Image (tube, rainbow, N blue to C red):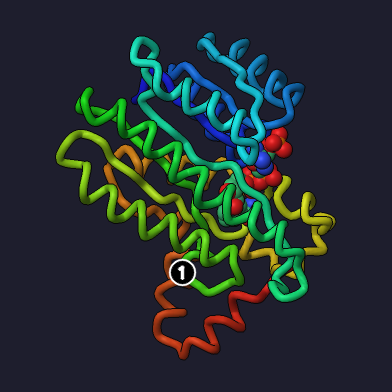
Amino acid sequence: MPKTALITGASSGLGAEFARQLAATGADLVLVARDRAALDAVAAKVRARYGVAVEVLPADLLKRRHLAKVIARLSEPERPIELLVNNAGFGLPLDFAANDIEDEVRHLHLHVEVPMRLSHAALAQMLPRGRGRIINVASVAGFIPRATYGACKGWLISFSRWANDRYAAQGVTTTAVCPGYTHTNFHERMGLARGKEGVPAWMWLDARTVVAEGLRDAAHGKGVSVPSLRYRALIALTRLVPASVAIRFGERGR
Ligand SMILES: NC(=O)c1ccc[n+]([C@@H]2O[C@H](COP(=O)([O-])OP(=O)(O)OC[C@H]3O[C@@H](n4cnc5c(N)ncnc54)[C@H](OP(=O)(O)O)[C@@H]3O)[C@@H](O)[C@H]2O)c1
């Protein structure tokens, strides 16, 4: 298990769960998100419970200066980061044509450019050390077309699969963890009250299971991890049906 992990979007949902489960293995943490108070609360809990060292690094990853701070932390050779979890994200309504284009650009930036820049900085340290791990939190939507969200997550899956193949022999693995619908703050932040997302109960996963399966697959060096048998079956099924049917299915929810 890594000595120190840096997690983006660690103030809530899956990121906070990655923090808890990694701390439980004894890993020290660097927690990144905008909400300092929420990060402090996660940090205080894991410090008290697991006795690990936790740095809080508040940053809006969409701001160049803030992103530079995170890249600088990843680039410190004397305090190596052995696991990078690219997790920060947010959702937009599915009607691309009706969305504000600047919101779409921010969405693309946070889901693609930010993890690309952070992965590049992490690899620069990890490859010479001959060890390291990157987890990119993608989505089942990366397999089933779903507006620009699915396109961004598809980029992460394709990149992770390639990077894992390219750099695993040099000791650095990359894993795209692809959750289905998971109970976090993601949907509420989009203005959808819990239970009003238009998604049947059986499709919901809990963050604990998603993170446990994702970490296990990353430890096994897998390029892609799809938590839960039901979503692995669903993805296999959507490959057998015409693209238009898969797209209708992908539009469920929100
Ligand atoms: N929940 C699902 O159903 C689901 C399914 C598949 C994939 N995912 C993916 O899982 C990841 C985590 O989402 P979640 O479900 O855990 O949602 P969440 O509870 O809303 O957490 C999102 C995290 O991203 C951070 N964040 C958002 N904008 C940021 C910015 N500009 N700079 C820094 N941090 C930022 C938020 O922190 P601050 O607000 O404090 O900045 C928060 O910690 C996302 O990439 C999402 O696409 C979620």
> In x, y percent, where is residue 63?
64, 36
176 in relation to 73, above or below: below
- Name the quadrant containing residue 218: top left
- Amino acid type, residue under disc 1 in the picture: Phe
Query: In which quadrant is the N terminus drawn?
Result: top left
Q: Quadrant of the C terminus?
A: bottom right
- Counting every numbered tag in the picture gives 1
The residue at 44%/19% (across/down) is 27
Question: Which class describes the residues within 10 Å of circle 1: few (<14), some (14-19), or many (20+)?
Answer: many
Tell me which residue sits at (76%, 64%) in the image. 100
Kindly identify the residue that appears in the image at 35 percent across and 51 percent down: 160
Pick whichever, 116 or 84, lies toward us.
116
Is 237 located above or below residue 20 in the figure? below
Q: Position of residue 73 (x, y in %)?
A: 47, 20
Position above or below: 239 against 205? below
Q: Is residue 182 visible?
A: no
The location of residue 11, given as percent across then percent down, is: 67, 31
Residue identifier under label 1: 143
- The extreme front residue here reads 65
Q: Quadrant of residue 198?
A: bottom right
- Mark 1 residue element: loop
Seen at 36% across and 47% down, the residue is 175
Label 1 lies in ligand 1 vicinity (Cβ under 8 Å): no
In the displayed image of the protein, which residue is found farthest to the left?
169
- The quadrant of the rendered image in which ligand 1 is seen is top right
Residue 104: image x %, image y %? Answer: 67, 60
